[in-house]
Amino acid sequence: MRGEYSLGEPIPTEDQLQKYYGISRTTVRLALAKLVNEGYIRRQQGKGTYVNPQGLVTKGRPKPLSRDMFGVKSTTQIIQSAGMKVRTEVLDFARELPSEDVAEKLGINEKDPVLHFERVRYADDRPLVLEKSWIPAAQCPDLKREDIKGSLYLVLFKKYHHHIAAAHQSLRAILASELDARILDLQIGEAVMLVHGVTYLDDGRAIEAQESHFRGQSIEFIIELGKYSQYARLMPHDLLRRRKSTAMKAVGSTAGH
């Protein structure tokens, strides 16, 4: 038993900590839960508890990736904009008939085949999101499993000259299922952000129906509302200075008339 542990190194088990410090199992679990919530350690199902990698903790809190909702952005862009390395694991890739819901979202018939694939996207080798996608096979007839190991939107542009123009997405918080916990390195019941969406081309056709399961503590979604939403990320004194400048210009314009 040591006093310090390096980044990424496993820490002692609950049983070892209980015996070493002579405290109850409940006290140990509460202490570890606090460290998990503050981002210092992470539990890996079936393997143990580890000190969090550098860069994922800031001032005792997990450092989430930011996803602003002002335009269509791929997961690759989100991860790279945070200065992190992207890695993709393709879990499944198949040609199949769509469900009624998927067909409706894509604007196709239930007898029209789709390409369905599931991927895990990693940020610096830590799982960030489980993505499930459905694409009309007619729009990407020879898309292969190897093509989706990187940015899907980039492949759609380079291989098929498809221009992504818009997307509709809905977000809600859910509890991690057994599948989420296993794939995203979570405990069952931890927070997951569920995102459903449809992506459209510049000609108005739907190109992708999607379902994404993000680690709740690893992502934040930024939404700006209202007339002054473009200034939402300015500090109060910056915003005040901007408004004063606008007011002075208005006064000057009025005086000139």
Image (cartoon, rainbow, N blue to C red):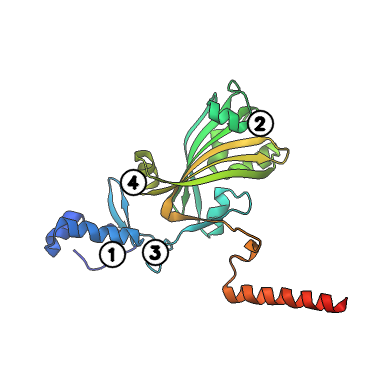
Residue 189 is left or right of residue 234, and the answer is left
Q: CA distance from mark 2 to mark 1?
A: 52 Å
Q: Which mark is residue 189?
A: 4
Mark 3 or 2, nearer chain start = 3
Query: In the figure, residue 254 lies in which quadrant?
Result: bottom right
Q: Tell me which amino acid carries mark 1.
A: Tyr
SS assignment at label 1: loop
The reply, left or right, for residue 148 in relation to residue 140 is left
Q: Which mark is residue 61?
A: 3
Tell me, yes or no, whether the two marked residues, 3 and 2, touch with CB atoms within 8 Å: no
Query: Residue 29's x, y, as percent?
Result: 22, 56
Spatial distance from mark 3 to mark 1, Cα to Cα? 18 Å
Tell me the kind of residue under disc 2.
Gln
- Residue annotated with mark 1: 5
210 in relation to 55, above or below: above
Picture quadrant of residue 234: bottom right
